[in-house]
Amino acid sequence: MFDFFTFQVRPRIIFKAGAIDGLRAEIEQLRASRTVIITDQGTRDAGLIERVQAGMAGATTLAGVFSNVPQGASIAATEQAAAFAHSVEANLLIAVGGGSSLDTAKAMRILLAEGGTLRAHADNIRLHHPLIPLIAIPTTAGSGSEVSTWASVRDATARTKISLNHPALAPDLALLDPELTYTMPPQLTAATGLEALAHAIEALAGINANPISDILALQAIDMISNNLRDATYDGGDMAARGAMLIAACIAGMAFSSSGGSGLGMIHALALAIGGTLDVQHSLVNTVLLPYGMQFNSVAVPNRFARIARYMGVNSGGRPEEDVIADGIDAVRLLAADCGLPSRLRDVGVPQAAIPSIVDTALTDPAWLNNPRTVTPEQLLEILYTAW
Ligand SMILES: [Fe+2]
């Protein structure tokens, strides 16, 4: 039974192949005269900014393009982006790219509205002014940042990740156009898809799960298990690309709407690793996902049996522990079929870094949603096994 929960999805969502061509009408509704695009060099090199510019032409003045978002959003780049948008008097941001570009745009809005430094806002976001409008256009199908209230930003000096969370951080519009994901290379397609799967699984297994986050997470698991292989092996498969974009978006809603479930140990570890090392967040999540499932499954076996069924495991009349084991194997097989690595050593994590990763991970707020408590010794064992 549920005594209490809240649930709010903030942004309007538009899904359509070619939706970018209708961007003009969306901007006109926001009455924005000066627009800055926030993106990364890879997205720019893929020619996607030209498509965005064509879609917005006539509705607003393009005041500038900030394309210096690094892999893993950083405080320095976020503060640079805010200074740039301030200098050109932007009154609309359009974030185009993966989670790093979207998180940068979300976080910089705090600085534009309130001034100060991101570090000063990190622990306690108090907004006294409205945030500049933001249109989020994901070009990967993974982070769910286009609908989430979170922004994760790397503090290179303190070698940690700052997690910013406020209901107002969610974008005003999430524009999902699968055509913008066609050029995503196979490994990034696969890794970001597994990242979305990790969001859905952690949301479903978490102690703050509720009936709304559950149904979103289960739908995401079903769509990812049925479409990720096709999207990886045929980048132009419109149906698979569309399904993955929607799945990543609804997995984002499951864990991170205002009232969404939250994440758990996999993200606590991945964020600790991402704070100290220059690694791809989605690849780290991919490697850790089966280990986290294994560890947590004893705490909430019925939840992991459900996950297994939505991963396509036949559960009829079989012992629950066998169904759960097959579900974890199905996740491993999906990653392997898509050509993803299965060891931490293969995604840029040195073995010597493991003890400090454990120290940092244990302080991450993602634990608040994890269904099982953990000791430092257990975490060390998990990471050495995954290494
Ligand atoms: Fe994530």
Image (spheres, rainbow, N blue to C red):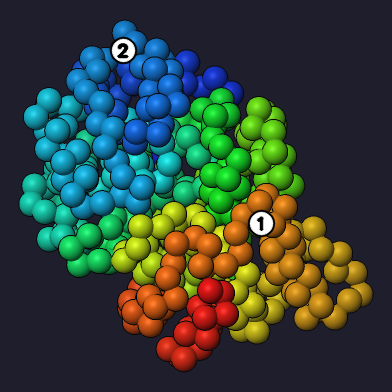
Residue at image coords 57%, 67% = 343
Q: Find the distance from the CA under tag 2 to the CA under tag 1.
A: 42 Å
User: Nearer the observer, disc 2 or disc 1?
Assistant: 1
Q: Looking at the rendering, which quadrant does residue 53 occupy?
A: top left
Question: Reading the chain from its start, which is encountered first: label 2 or label 1?
Answer: 2
Q: Secondary structure at mark 2?
A: loop
**Residue denoted by label 2:** 59
Residue 52 seen from this side: no
The amino acid type, in three-letter code, at marker 2 is Ala
Q: Is residue 184 left or right of residue 25?
A: right
Q: Is residue 132 left or right of residue 225?
A: left
Residue 183 seen from this side: yes
Residue count near mark 1 (Cα–Cα under 10 Å), binned few <14, some 14–19, many ≥20 = many
Residue count near mark 2 (Cα–Cα under 10 Å), binned few <14, some 14–19, many ≥20 = some
The quarter of the picture where the N terminus appears is bottom right
Residue at image coords 16%, 55% = 118
Q: Looking at the rendering, which quadrant does residue 91 occupy?
A: top left
Residue at image coords 31%, 66% = 276
Residue at image coords 56%, 60% = 286
Residue 225 badge: none
Q: In the figure, 301 relative to 196: above or below?
A: below
Residue 335 badge: 1
